Amino acid sequence: MHNAISLYELNSLVKEVIETTMSDEYWVEAELSEAHENGGHCYIELIEKDENGNTPIAKARAMVWRNTWNIIKPYFERVAGESLHSGMKVMLKLYPTFHPAYGFSYTVSDIDPTYTLGDMAKRRKEIIIKLKENGLFELNKELEIPMFTQRIAVISSNTAAGYGDFCKHLSENEHHLYFKTELFSATMQGESVESSIINALNQIYERIDDFDVVVITRGGGGTSDFSGFDTYTLAENVAQFPLPIITGIGHERDDTILDLISNVRVKTPTAAAEFLINRLEYVYQKIEDIKFNISNIAERKMEMEKMRLEKVASTIPSLFALIKIRQETHLDIVMQRIYNKMTHDINEAKHHLNILTDNIKPLCERITTNQRHKIEMLEQKTETLDPDKLLKRGYSITLYNGKAVRDAKLLKSGDEITTKLENGTVKSTIK
């Protein structure tokens, strides 16, 4: 028989060895593959990846007990500006523990937010450099916000207080300016921020002609996870979107990458509404100023024209009398010229007509004589060609189907022909 111990006894030995030989706490750099709260405690999955790839080379479980988590969480979120989430690099102070029933894990006693802040800043800097290298950083800023910006597509959570504040502020503006808003609901916190906002942008793009600008708002609540707004993919989509994008995410920390590449960045949803109202009020005031200027110019112009007309009216009688005398004199001269011209043309025509009259009689006689001679010659030729005279001389004419037969080869057996003589006709059948 072997000398055996129970599993519980073995685990208790392991627990004793770990607690004896590794009683110190250690600061450890790691990446979070998962982090969630349950019962007031925070449960964490830690991972370390190969520097040359994404292959995990180490994994471990860790947890923060409720009393410690209640202290760490608010401090970390206040400094780092976001909550623990998958993919975040962290610096944790922990010590190893081994429970006979639950196995090995690490207990976290502290988390350094400045480390995470530095890692986030590094990652954000790399994304910004990449955006600039690809010519995307200023792309959306180059779009001009329309003068009459009233049709607004809003990307926000339908339950966010910031969205309600935005709509209320727009509708209750001092000048009663009209704005039409339409919500495209999206997740504004957590890991799905990126995909959710991109999906909303795609929906807006399908109706691009229905909107003037896009407003991305969040607002409300305390400090929480803003990492979803610091991704290259989201920045790339926003930068290349064909409408100007205004961000009012509602935080006081450094600008997110989404803020940096948007057309206009304001702090809060209410500030975004105020920006749109001020812009439209400016346009409205410009129109009012132009209307006032046009009215003044028109009044001055009408007054000047009235004075000019009065001046012209006072000079009309004398001018009319002078013009009348000049026109009457000119008309007399024109009438005399017309009379002289007509008299000259009539005399010229009479003279020409007399010449034509003297020449036309002998010409007509000559033409008549020539034509009479031609007629006599034609009569002679006609008499010579008269068929009746040929018949009287003993000739006959053979007809087939009413036409003279000139060639016997054209006739065939059975054809009926007619022979016309001086006196009568003879019908024959060809045999």
Image (tube, rainbow, N blue to C red):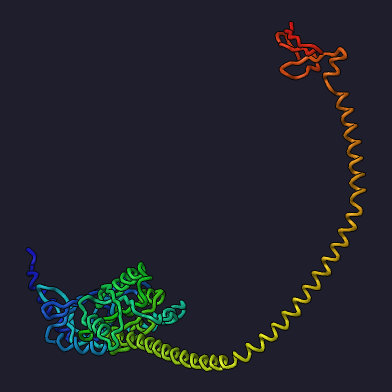
Quarter holding the N terminus is: bottom left
Q: Tell which of 283 and 342 is nearer to you.
A: 342
Task: Determine which quarter of the picture holds residue 78.
Answer: bottom left
* Whether residue 128 is situated above or below residue 357 in the rendered picture: below
User: Residue 288, percent across and down?
Assistant: 39, 88
Q: Does the image show residue 28?
A: no
* Whether residue 354 is situated above or below residue 365 in the rendered picture: below
User: Residue 169, percent across and down?
Assistant: 25, 85
Quarter holding the C terminus is: top right
Q: Tell which of 426 and 403 is nearer to you.
A: 426
Task: Determine which quarter of the picture holds residue 348.
Answer: bottom right
Q: Residue at x 64, y 88 (%)?
A: 321
Task: Determine which quarter of the picture holds residue 3.
Answer: bottom left
Q: Tell which of 52 and 261 is nearer to you.
A: 261
Q: Tell which of 245 and 384 is nearer to you.
A: 384
User: Residue 109, percent across and down?
Assistant: 18, 86
Q: Residue at x 40, y 82 (%)?
A: 147
Task: Give the left or right position of residue 104, taking residue 338 as reference.
Answer: left
Q: Residue at x 26, y 88 (%)?
A: 113
